[in-house]
Amino acid sequence: MAKNDKLFMVIPCYNEQEVLPETSKRLKEKLNTLIKSEKISPDSRIVFVDDGSRDNTWNMIEELHKEDPIFQGVKLSRNRGHQNALLAGLMTVKDICDISISMDADLQDDINAIDGMVEKYENGAEIVYGVRSQRKTDTFFKRYTAESYYKLMNKMGADIVYNHADFRLMSSRALDFLSDFSEVNLFLRGIVPMIGLKTDVEYYERAERFAGESKYPLFKMLQFAFEGITSLSTKPIKIISGLGVFIFFTSFIVLIYSLIRHFTGATIPGWTTTVLSVWAIGGLTMISLGVIGEYIGKIYLETKNRPRYIISTYLGDKEDEQMLRDVKFLK
Ligand code: UDP
Ligand code: MG
């Protein structure tokens, strides 16, 4: 592949004013080194996607863009969450770049892994997954829950890459295929493997957040995990059906048992068992309905087909902006 491919970094940012100065500095250094060694085109860019931040993030992005055109900004009209912000960034650069690399703003992903990713791209891979080789810096709890989650996902039949978050290289062709997935309930790590194409893996060590707070407290993390399962797999529904069948057959056994007791005259006041089974079956029924309801809710949202994000401003190279306006991507 040509050595002067345009690399666009896509960085979703939500209230990241504490880390942005450092992140922008380090990314710029990295890109300039890659440009100097002629690994990527001098027209490569760093795109910050402001996901409706309430702090100074967007002002800082505007400043960066003014000082150096290597920095670009995409501003969403409001907070839409990490996955949508990432998608907005990727779809903006899709027709402008040759290669995209998505990365978190907090410097948890190792910037030095970018070299290896670009090299693997040059060797023909169209998608390169950044995979954490270890989770030393995560708490035991986060590490344990995260790792069990990946295992659970694979058991549920979702093909996701173990210990890979959203640090990944994608060619513009891969992005084009990604744009054909129009689901509203977005779980990128589950969708990207569905694209196929030649893939590779780059290992890196995950660092601690450089500054600021995690935007994923426990509750949001659990929500995200559940979202991932229900948007990629229908196995929970199958498990419920299986459970229903099992309980139905069990009730036959109970019926036979109680008839025998009845005719042998050994009927006792079976208060305990009655109450227990009412609660058990009642609870089970409610959980089952809840899970099915979750899927129906997803169908509801999908049929509405609402826009996944709205870009209110794009700060980029003038001709690119014009091109995006021509295809009505920007208004
Ligand atoms: N993020 C975002 N929108 C949100 C929440 C987070 O764009 O609503 C961004 C955030 O700025 C960061 C990335 O998503 O670049 C990952 O978030 P964070 O580091 O807080 O998650 P963690 O690494 O703790 O899972
Ligand atoms: Mg983080």
Image (spheres, helix red, strand yellow):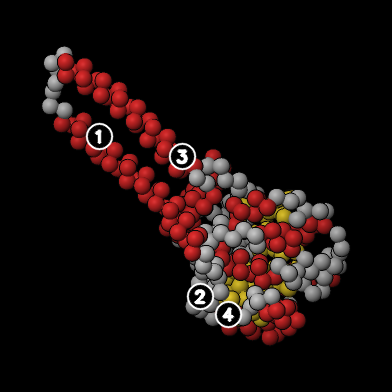
Q: How many marks?
A: 4
Percent position of residue 140, x then y: 50, 49
The residue at 49%/78% (across/down) is 54
Q: Which mark is residue 277?
A: 1
Which residue is at 54% across, 50% downward? 232
Mark 2: secondary structure: loop
Residue 160's mark? Answer: none
Mark 3 or mark 2: which is in front? 3
Q: CA distance from mark 3 to mark 2?
A: 37 Å
State which mark lies toward you, 1 or 3.
Answer: 3
Going by the numbered disc 3, the residue's amino acid type is Lys
Disc 4 on helix, strand or loop?
strand
Write down the residue under mark 3.
238
| Closest to the observer, 312 or 289 | 289
For residue 331, side relative to residue 318 (left or right): left
> Can you give x and y, in whole percent of width and height, for residue 256 in the image?
26, 20
Residue 185: x percent and y percent?
A: 52, 59
| Identity, as a three-letter code, of the amino acid under mark 4 | Ser
What residue type is disc 1 on? Ser
Mark 1: which secondary structure? helix
Q: Quadrant of the N terminus?
A: bottom right
Residue farthest along the top direction in this orientation: 264
Q: Are marks 1 and 3 in contact (CB under 8 Å)?
A: no
Q: Which residue is mark 4?
A: 312
Name the residue carrying label 2: 78
Residue at image point 65% right, 60% down: 180
Do tag 1 and tag 2 residues touch (Cβ < 8 Å)? no
Number of other residues with Cα within 10 Å of mark 2, as a class: few under 14, some 14 to 19, many 20 or more: some
Looking at the picture, does residue 290 appear above or below residue 68? Answer: above
- Lateral position of residue 240 relative to residue 196, left or right: left
Task: Give the spatial CA distance, label 1 vs label 3.
Answer: 23 Å
